[in-house]
Image (cartoon, rainbow, N blue to C red):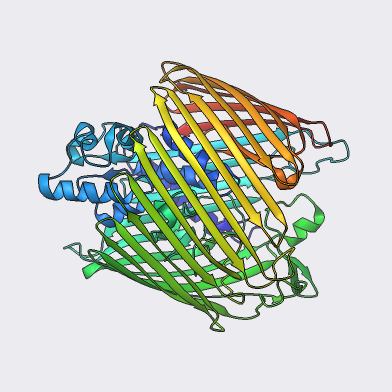
Amino acid sequence: MCGRFEGKTTMIRAALLGAAFLLLYSAGREVSAQELPESVVRMIEQLCGDGEGDAEELTEYFETLMARPLDLGRADRETLESCPLFTPFMVVSLLEYRQEYGPVASEAELALVDGFGQAAVDMLRPFVTFGAEGKAPGRRRLSGKLTLRSRWDRKREDEAVEGMPVPLLVKFRMEAAGKFGAGFTLESDAGERGFPDFYSVYVSAHDLRLSRDGRYRLAAAVLGDYSLRFGQGLVLWNGFSMSGLSSVSSVVRRAQGVRPYASTDENDYFHGAGVTVAFPEGVEASVFYSCNRQDAKVEGGYFVSKPEDGLHDSEALRLARDALGETVLGANVAWTGTWLGLGLTAAAYKYDRMDGRRRSYYNSHLRYDGWWGNASVDFLLSLRGVRVFGEAALDRDLHAAVIAGAVLPLSDKVEASAVYRYYSKDYIATHAGAYCRSNVNNEHGVSAAVRWAASSDAVVSSAVEYTHFPYARFGVREASDAVKAWLDCDWRVSGPHSLYFKAGSTFDWGRDTRLFRLRADYRYVPESGVESSTRIEGCWSGGPGMLFYQQAAYRSPSGKFRCSIRATLFWTHGWDSRIYSYEGDVPGSFSSMAYYGKGAGLYVLFTYKPVRWFNVSFKGSASKYADSGRDRLGVRVQITVPF
């Protein structure tokens, strides 16, 4: 259950926490914890380094995949296509290889399959197995992680803290026997009264037989807090998605159904229960019910605003805590065949207060009271690496939203994708999360991307997106257009040496903005010893800007100790020419800083793992601005206990 401690949910919370610990002590033996490989960390940086996407949740996704690796001898097309590490050509090649020669038995054999190679095998190694005989000996019946994290940020003298002096986070996740899971998150921000101010708990199960012959299965069940991801996201999709311009093949989404909630966002979740049952002939049915509380400022019985940052460090924000209730219920029915998948999704929801938010030129048509809802139909066709997908949805007042696209492997080295979207200006879907530029309404657009594996060590990618806004939007009082495009090259020069280049531009005629970027990175990453990373980026938006950093890191041969230090210089014309820069952080946490103005930054990061089941990390950071009073100084400490 998600919420804040106020006494009324104590018994339910205690029961779920008890169930979580019961699973922990009854599941069996330990498992060796693993860290994400450098190649995956770099992927997360590229996907989320521009301030888009949830890097922390993406990290948890890959950690879960490590705990529940894919068996390449048995994984079907749907399972392989749902993993973002496989390109369409890799999926087709692996399936055809298995059909002709039988299951792949080793990493060496996988490297010989068309479309893979040694670099791909190195990236996949922590996330796959090769049948019962190929499983790594460290993977057993139980895996999990307990994380404790806190930080301190220097406050100005007029910002006295009355509540918690520092923020505190406690997070626990575990899986047992490959079938059961449990977890909880306890969190308070600085200035909030008591710990925890926010909590989240769940217990889950998946892939359990409901009949002797296994034709009926409990595909997934979550009690507590969960996420819903169906179709392409026009009705229900909360949490992260890898779709977008950042990846060619990931523009198509694979519905993930009911999943445990893994984020610390205090408002974007479902609270109750969700179940998916698998029937014969590829049919799955999901039902869910949610009744949660959200932050809202209330005046005269109406909610007039919805704070979304989860902070309750002032009296006004404490009064807004849990002031708005929402009920959500719905269902999804999906059928998956050999090459075609179909889905139907329906959801209904309502707030327990009337909407009193101020109406303006850009949002007066996006209001509802009482019950609201959406329904959609989606499809996904997969045929020899070609994926064609789409979803069409209606809201209660029959306003429409449509998205459709295709991913095409043009050869073993080239793949391309194209996506079209039409979102009516009046379409309302509170829990939608489909691919968009700003919101799942008031957008018509098309995007195209291409990826070329020029060699086993070099990949060139490019994309362009056009968006038309047919109605006024925030800050723009009339119809307008925008274009975004980029070209990048990721090149492993030799051994530990690699280069990355990216050029991009964004034009928004409604906001009268023109942004150009040019970036170059160099990395030296040996298996152990001293690492080096250099980046220089220039931009232009109303004026010139630049960012330069130099980073050095050391990893001990035993892997027990790692430290890094980075110095950054930046100078930009203002917020419109801000430059995002990924920063290393404590394990499981990523920072993407937005640099603007003039100044310098410095951080140091230490991670020490004296024994397999204990990891301690420390980060100190500082920024000095020459043109404002936004100087910052911070310290972050984390203890991780993997098992």
Q: Nearer the viewer, residue 230 or 206?
A: 230
In the rendered structure, the answer to whether residue 501 lies left or right of residue 386 reads: right
On-image quarter of the C terminus: top left
* Residue furthest to the bottom: 397
Relative height, residue 78 to residue 468 (above, below): above
Residue 78 x %, y %:
29, 57
Q: Nearer the viewer, residue 151 or 105?
A: 105
In the rendered structure, the answer to whether residue 24 lies left or right of residue 584 reads: left
Residue 373 x %, y %:
53, 77
Q: Quadrant of residue 305?
A: bottom right
Residue 177 x %, y %:
30, 45
- Name the residue: 68% across, 78% down: 365
Residue 36 appears in the picture as rendered: no
Relative height, residue 581 to residue 301 (above, below): above
In the rendered structure, the answer to whether residue 267 lies left or right of residue 524 reads: right
Residue 587 appears in the picture as rendered: yes
* Residue furthest to the left: 101
